[in-house]
Amino acid sequence: MNIAELIAASRKIVIKIGSNTLAKPDGTVNTDFMDEFAAQCADLIAKSKQVVVVSSGAQVAGMSTLNRWTRKKDIHYRQALCAIGQVELMHQWRTSFFKQGLHIGQLLLTKEDFNDSYRTLNMRNTLFTLVDEGVIPVINENDSICVEEIRIGDNDNLSALTAELWAADLLILCSDIDGVYTANPKEEPDAELIQIVTDIHDLKNRISIGSANAFGTGGMATKLQAAEKVTGCGIPMILTNGGTPRILEKLAFGSAAATLFCV
């Protein structure tokens, strides 16, 4: 099954948006992207799809709002920035989806939530209720209160845990790269895009993973971790470049560059 056929066959879709996708080159929030993304989600819903969004970007939004803290590295300032930015981020998602006649609901989670069976049950119930009522759940890690012991650490893995929790049919990671390459294409011009992955362990032995990007906490390593999680649960994953105009639409038509992780 190719990507277009997979999207056509999938009803429950989790879509993760990375910080670099949400940020403009100057570090401010890309509201035009958010409007376009919301419109594409509305198109999916009109085709009887259900959508859950995992959105990074609280710290980026915080820096956009209160840039006097931009250069501060202290963890307390970073957590405070996330507290400020999460409000701004959700305001913009609310605005973007409201233009499509859709409402959103916020879930801020930690690793502890996924490790506690009672919380997990309540998370599932909330997710199913929101989606069944036509509301878009927007999920992020609760960065303002997280310490190392309870952090998931990146939204790639958070989106994988969410897909598993919701029993999704498909996970789409929208990053700042078209997919998995044989090496970092920003450093190696001859790197080749790997379009289909059937064996993640073998893939790790064949590629150069590299490090995290400028705004995000992840990198290719966390994306492969997410792929391992979901494919192990029978959920395929697509990694693609969220900065590509109308990316969800192009994926649905099979015209976007991407890597498909098969189950």
Image (spheres, rainbow, N blue to C red):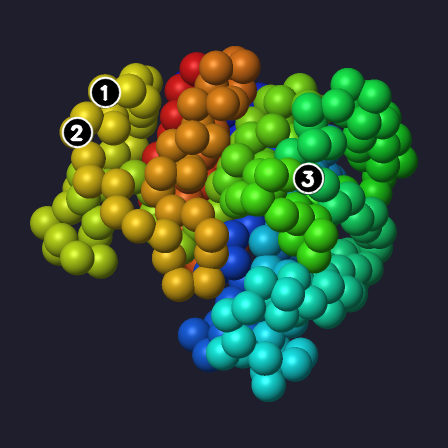
Q: Nearer the viewer, residue 255 or 12?
A: 12
| Res 43 quadrant in image | top right
- Classify mark 2: helix, strand or loop: helix
Mark yes or no: residue 231 visible.
yes
As drawn, which residue projects farthest toward the left?
190
Q: In the rendered structure, are the residues bearing label 1 and label 2 in contact, judged by CB atoms less than 8 Å apart? A: yes
Is 99 on the left-hand or right-hand side of 205? right
| Amino acid type, callout 2 | Arg
**Tag nearer the camera, 3 or 1:** 3
Identified at 47% across, 31% down, the residue is: 226
The x and y percentages for residue 34 are: 63, 62
Q: Callout 3: few (<14), some (14-19), or many (20+) C-alpha neighbours within 10 Å?
A: many
Identified at 51% across, 40% down, the residue is: 156
As drawn, which residue projects farthest toward the bottom?
68
Q: In the rendered structure, are the residues bearing label 3 and label 1 in contact, judged by CB atoms less than 8 Å apart? A: no
Identified at 66% across, 48% down, the residue is: 146
Mark yes or no: residue 59 visible.
no
Is 234 on the left-hand or right-hand side of 51? left
Kindly identify which residue carries mark 3.
Answer: 110
- Image quarter in which the C terminus is found: top left
Kindly identify which residue carries mark 1.
Answer: 202
The x and y percentages for residue 197 are: 31, 24
| Res 10 quadrant in image | top right
Identified at 25% across, 34% down, the residue is: 194
The x and y percentages for residue 141 are: 66, 46
Kindly identify which residue carries mark 2.
Answer: 206
Point out the tag, 3 or 2, that comes first from the N-terminus.
Answer: 3
Point out the tag, 3 or 1, that comes first from the N-terminus.
Answer: 3
